[in-house]
Image: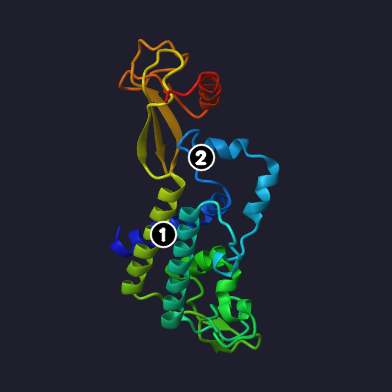
């Protein structure tokens, strides 16, 4: 597998992760910073239905009013990720775009002299999802073959193939954006001790394990001697998987946290 093929795949994967988690970040901007417990993925399944309205609102953060954001870290991350992808789209468009005005595949640049903010923003007004999908199309060399008019006359393709140096720049930018988003949401790969929440069955120390592509798990430090009604892992630790985490949340809620 060549480096270019790997770069295309890794870039597309990173962009898709950003799109899938963008709604979570928008919710985080309007929510006070959360403790590490319960895990964000589990909290999402328990979220009240009225909170979901925020996910549907995908207007660019740069065009929103933010009178009193409840989580400045999430807002800063969102603005930074938007800026990275918007600037990357500008760079790629300047190099490979041949689509004519009016073509919906065209990336429109900012127009500072426009009458209103959305017009001035160009394609940025469509939000991060549009920019991400557009970039992915350039990375995968979509719409780079000659096209034909109705009378059969060939026309130039809307885009030229992406040069290798821009492909690898897109990969770097997409992975940086993905990493920052995952860290802000606490979904990057990490192990977080929960010293103020001892195991309800043996008082051992619990550790939360999270990662970007796996559901969260919790392990107990006591080992197989712990009486929790869950299996052990390869290290002999009691482990709560996705299906058993709600039971652990309930058990911990019944006991006071350790100061």
Task: Judge whether 120 appears above or below 177 on screen.
Answer: below
Q: CA distance from mark 2 to mark 1?
A: 19 Å
Quick one: which residue is furthest to the front in this view?
259
Label 1: which residue? 177
Residue 222, x across and y down, in percent: 33, 16
Mark 2 crowd level (few <14, some 14–19, many ≥20, 10 Å Cα): some
Task: Judge whether 180 appears above or below 37 on screen.
Answer: below
Residue 158, x across and y down, in percent: 52, 81
Of discs 2 and 1, which sits in the foreground? 2
Using the image as rendered, state which of residue 183 and residue 15 is in the foreground.
Answer: 183
Quick one: which residue is furthest to the right in this view?
50
Residue shown at 41%/21% (left/top)? 198
Picture mark count: 2
Tell which circle, 2 or 1, labels the residue nearer the N-terminal end: 2
Horizontal side of 172 relative to 145 (left or right) equals left
Residue shown at 57%/86% (left/top)? 100
Residue 101, x across and y down, in percent: 59, 86
């Amino acid at each position: 597998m060549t480096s270019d093929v790997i770069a295309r795949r890794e870039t597309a994967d990173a962009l898709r992760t950003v799109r899938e988690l963008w709604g979570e970040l928008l919710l985080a901007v309007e929510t006070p910073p959360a403790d590490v417990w319960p895990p964000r993925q589990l909290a999402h399944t328990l979220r009240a239905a009225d909170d979901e309205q925020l996910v549907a609102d995908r207007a660019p953060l740069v065009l929103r009013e933010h009178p009193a954001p409840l989580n400045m870290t999430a807002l800063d991350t969102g603005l930074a990720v938007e800026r990275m992808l918007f600037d990357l789209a500008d760079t790629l468009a300047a190099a490979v775009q041949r689509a004519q005005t009016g073509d919906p595949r065209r990336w429109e640049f900012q127009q500072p002299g426009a009458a209103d903010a959305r017009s001035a923003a160009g394609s940025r007004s469509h939000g991060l999802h549009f920019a991400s999908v557009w970039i992915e199309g350039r990375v995968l060399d979509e719409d780079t073959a000659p096209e034909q008019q109705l009378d059969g006359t060939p026309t130039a393709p809307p885009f030229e193939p992406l040069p290798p140096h821009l492909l690898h720049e897109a990969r770097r930018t997409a992975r940086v954006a993905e990493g920052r988003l995952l860290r802000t949401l606490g979904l990057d790969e990490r192990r977080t001790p929960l010293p103020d929440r001892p195991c309800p069955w043996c008082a051992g120390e619990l550790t939360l394990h999270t990662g970007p592509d796996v559901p969260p798990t919790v392990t107990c430090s006591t080992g197989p001697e712990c009486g929790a009604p869950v299996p052990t892992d390869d290290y002999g630790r009691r482990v709560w998987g996705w299906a058993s985490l709600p039971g652990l949340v309930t058990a911990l809620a019944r006991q006071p946290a350790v100061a």
